[in-house]
Amino acid sequence: MKFADFPQSVIDENVDYTVKEITNVIKKYGPRESGNENCLAAEKHIKKEMDTYCDETRFESYKMAPKAFLHWTKLVSAAIFLAVTVSAALVFTSVITFFTAQCIVGGVVFVGLFITVMEFLMYKQFMDVFYKKVEGHNLLGVRKPRGEVKRRIIISGHIDAAYEWRHILYGKKVPLMTICMGGTIGGAIISFVLSIVAIIANFVNMGAFGSFMCDYSFYFHFFTALMMVTLFLFVDFKTISPGANDNLTGTYAAACALRMLDMAGVDFENTEVCAMITDGEEAGLRGCKQWAKDHYDEYMNSGVETAILCVDTLTDLEYLNVYNRDMTGTVKHNQKFSQLVMDSAKEAGHDDLKFANVFFGSSDAAAFTQAGITATCLAAMDPSPADYYHNRRDSYDRLVPEAIKTGYEVILSTIFNFDENGLG
């Protein structure tokens, strides 16, 4: 079957179904923190539905530390703030010298920047050892082909929701996110550089410049300390976003891909179609990292061509793009698969999509690509970011059925083209 032959009535019905189901999940199961009981209850609800149109459904559990990914913001900000203020007090009371104070600030800032790079830029599980572990669950639904499995396409979305980001919640009209995060990261980098220069100036004659750096550069550290207050207040760990758009739209995109095929009576000869619902994306891609580790051999060495399309937020239609670069631009997804999704979008009548870059943060697709598994990302969210991103405004009243429908059409078209040609 070609996408052009697929009944539009099935797509329309699934869009309505998605809106109703997302509303129901939010109302019935409450805040879905990564790895909590609400998250699992919502997954069980979806599994019960998937059992009716999948040949197989199953859970796979793993351990994760949900707060490790972002709680470092409080530790780092507090450490840098104290390093600056306490060392300044000790200098002015003649307990230590400016040189010692610069060493303290430079060292603490360096550690803070290192943790930031490891956790938020590279998504390493660097801080997990210091935090309590909980059990997370990934859910897989499978529609098997009539014959031998030669290809496998997986549509994936994460079900967990994010801790609230205050910068976006209170920055609806003022770009607090840009100002505060830019000031925090930029201030820390500059403070580290100034500390190094001031330390060197104690051993190397730099003339008036060296004297100035030794005597006055410390005052810039006070700006950095002030910005650390905003970082400390950045994440509200007591409030969870409803996660209607980010990412129940992706969750139901995965589930409804199989549901639509079932309703239309589509059975492929050699292509297995799967829906993967991951937990732990908002905890630093923990769920898909574990899945990639556990299933690498199956996806890469079994002779079955496998590709994973991660769907993350179908809301802002003007920003519906194929994200072929990810993890703050450091990860490049499989170009053949990304192009297949792009071509499929055009075939479905949506020729305004572009290749784009997840320039702040990451999607689940990055974890699969890092593991060497073919993947790419489809998303529709204002990257500025959207005013509902990671806060309480992301509820069912902000769903955009037209964006969901367009996303579903692109996904179906991708499935049909992958079945016909694979990545070749």
Image (cartoon, rainbow, N blue to C red):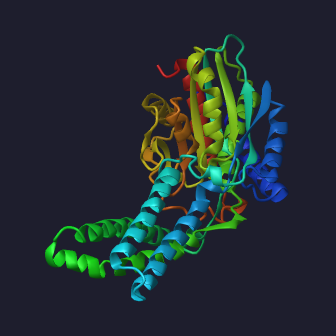
- Which residue: 68% across, 35% down? 276
- The image shows residue 263 at horizontal and vertical percentages of 76, 30
The image quadrant of residue 414 is: top right
**Is 19 or 130 nearer to us in this picture?**
130
Q: Residue furthest left?
A: 207
Query: Quick check: 204 left or right of 159?
Result: left
Q: What residue is rendered at 31% in x and 65% in y? A: 196
The answer to which of 48 and 33 lies nearer the viewer is 33
Quarter location, residue 307: top right
Residue found at the very far top of the displayed protein: 148
| Image quarter (top left, top right, bottom left or bottom right) of the N terminus | top right
In this picture, residue 254 sits left or right of residue 227 = right
The foreground one among 344 and 330 is 330
Residue 145 rendering spot, x and y as whole percentages: 70, 17
Q: Residue 183's image quarter?
A: bottom left
- Residue 162 position within the rendered picture, expressed as x and y whole percent measured from the top left: 65, 57
Q: Is residue 294 above or below residue 129?
A: above
Task: Give the left or right position of residue 85, taking residue 414 as reference.
Answer: left
Residue closest to the far front: 95
Residue 349 located left or right of residue 149: left
One can see residue 2 in this view:
no
